[in-house]
Every structure is written in C-alpha cells, then in structure tokens.
Image (cartoon, coloured by chain):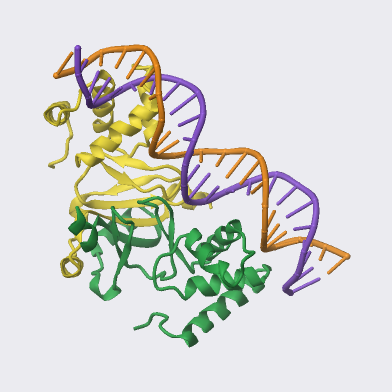
Chain colours: A yellow, B green, C purple, D orange
Amino acid sequence: MKSISNAGDLDQRVGRILSELRSRGQRVTPQRAAIIRLFLGRRDHPSADDIHRDLQAEYPMVALSTVYSTLSLLVEMGEAVEVPPEVSRTRFDPDVADHCHLICLSCGAVIDVPPHEVESDGATENFIRARDFHAVRQVREVYGYCAECAGKA
Amino acid sequence: MKSISNAGDLDQRVGRILSELRSRGQRVTPQRAAIIRLFLGRRDHPSADDIHRDLQAEYPMVALSTVYSTLSLLVEMGEAVEVPPEVSRTRFDPDVADHCHLICLSCGAVIDVPPHEVESDGATENFIRARDFHAVRQVREVYGYCAECAGKA
DNA sequence: CTCGTTGCAAATCATTTGCAATGGA
DNA sequence: TCCATTGCAAATGATTTGCAACGAG
C-alpha cells in the first residue's frame, strides 16, 4: 500500500505541492490550497465541475475557471492525470501511478484496477523505445458497461 | 496480417457494412457510402473534420453533421472506435481490434502499436470478470511526446 | 509595491439537435 | 408513397480567455 490513504499522507503531499508552487515563483492563494486539498483527498475521478460544486459549501466564491486552472497546474506538475471525456466531461485522477481504468460507456463511471492487478507489458515497452516515443504515462482504458448499467440494458 | 491492406478487402468490408445497414432498415445514401469508403480506407485516425475536408473534393455538399452521424453509426455497429480527444478533437479508428495507441500530447498524433507487440493481461481480465464489468474494447493509451515533438521541446 | 491570480462574462470550439426538404426502398 | 436522412443553422456544453480588481510575497 503505497497510496495516500490517511490524513497525514495527504497533508504531506499537499504541503509538498504548495512548497513546489512557491519555489516555482507561483502563489499559494486560499482558493488554490482549498482546491488542491479537496482534490487530492478524493479517491475517485472528479470533473472540474465536481470539485467546484464540492467547494461551494466552504468557499462559495471560487470560480469554476479557477478550478480549471488549478487542475491544469497539477497536471503540469505531474500531480494529477486527465481521464479523457468518453462520456461528456474530462475527469481528473489524483493517482498518478500507471494503472488501469474500467470506463462505463453508459454512466461514465471510472473504476480503478489496482496496480498489482496489472501486468507490465515488455513487448510494448520495446516498441515505444524503438519509436523514440517519450512516454509520460500510460493507462489501459477498458471501455464497457459496469455491472449496474449492464443490468438495466 | 489480418488487417485490411488492399482494395479488395476494403470493398468487401464496405459491402458488408452497407448490407448490414440495409438489413437494419437503414438507408444507404451516396453520402454515407462515400464517408464509409473513405474512412475505412484510411490507415490513420482521422477526426470527423478530417473526413469532411477530404470529402470536399468529390462530394462538396456533404455536411459535417452527416459525417458525425455516419461515424457514430459505425461506432455503434462496431466498425470504428473512438480515440478520446486528448488534444482537441475526437479521432476515429477503423481498426477495431484491441490494440495500443501512443498519443503525442504535443501534436496529437496517434501511433498504433501493432497487435503482436501487445501482450495480453491475464490479471486484469480476472479483475474485470470479478467486477462483472462488460468490456467491449480495451485500448492501452500511452501518453507522451513523439520523437519529432520531443526534439523540438 | 509588484505581478501572479481571481472572478466574471464573453468567446471558442467540437459536437448535437431541430426542422423542412429530399430521395432511397 | 413513406419515413430515414440530409443540409443548414441554431443550440449546447465543456473549456478557455480577456481584463480590471485583488492580494500574496
């Protein structure tokens, strides 16, 4: 279990990111800190709008565009990963380790396959190297229907 | 080499699809036939707009919305696969076999990894089965920078 | 005090939709 | 003939952008 599973680890990661922001000459505003803490604490794959909505309770005045810009910043820093919008909007994943997603084509749910369930793929690695492709992340996306949606169909 | 590599195979696949359309009670219009033939003949991953542009030469009056609807039809029939819009727009892949894509985050290029370079992943299959997830396709998406873009950076 | 950041509203851009006209089956 | 399909234009919905006010460093 190397994942961020408790408050201590979360605070540590948030702190590290805020420091890195400062050292990059960028500012740590209350909005940013709130967005980052809330996002990193989630164990699912929220959209920018999800984050924005969740923020309303404590910070009613955070603009959606600020949420977008902060999430982009995290992606740029390698602290978040985008899950492409198969069903409507882009989702963001605070787990940046290479892993596998099961994406439901009906409800848009994104289910994580734990890393230890995913085998590495030596042959593909060789191909990537041969092509001189600089991989930054890889995700196996399995598209289909989750148990619930398959039941309804 | 089981892929569609020559004109005969292409015509055969186009014919099969047009027949299936008719048998589904749907109509085979000149626009549809043109879009389908042009799309299936491509060995890359065109966007709806790419197809529309290529069509202008021979069929100046095909609407972009018609291209969209025809491509959706192909996806629904299992004759095309969507590549989610990591960089701007959705691309469509006429190769529906499970395979692997290298997606360049800079120029948006989609490079295919030939099927025989991709190992199957037994552990993930087990997880999928255990979750009762009905998989319809899986694509390993490797995000990064192609040789050309990496050179420029 | 300085600029990076914010909130807002307007702009963009891909994709979808409404609808009357068209033309395959 | 009948109804699926078309072209067009307008609508949608996510994301981005322009800009003046704000506030962290």
Indicate the quadrant where residue A49 lies: top left
Q: Please tell me which residue is depicted at 59% across the width and 56% down the height of the picture.
A: B65
The percent coordinates of residue B22 (x first, y second) are: 66, 73
In the rendered image, is residue A29 in sight?
yes
> Does residue B122 appear to the left or right of A126 in the view shown?
right
- A48 or B66: nearer the eye? B66
Q: Residue furthest bottom?
A: B8
Q: In which quadrant is the N terminus of chain B drawn?
A: bottom left
Image quadrant where residue B61 sits:
bottom right
Q: Is residue A59 left or right of residue B54?
A: left
Reply above or below: B122 against A19. Answer: below
In this view, A38 is above or below A106: above
Q: Position of residue B141 (x, y in %)?
A: 29, 58
Labels in figure, total: 0
Q: Residue at point 53% right, 83% down? A: B11
Where residue B127 sits in the image (x, y, percent)? 28, 55
Nearer-the-camera pick, A81 or B145: B145
Q: Provide residue B33's location: percent of width, then percent of height.
A: 60, 73
Q: Quadrant of residue A121?
A: bottom left
Q: Is residue A145 left or right of residue A24?
A: right
Q: Residue at x 39, y 52 (%)?
A: B85
**Quick check: can you spot residue A53?**
no
Q: Residue at x 23, y 62 (%)?
A: B148
Q: Is residue A119 above or below residue A7?
A: below
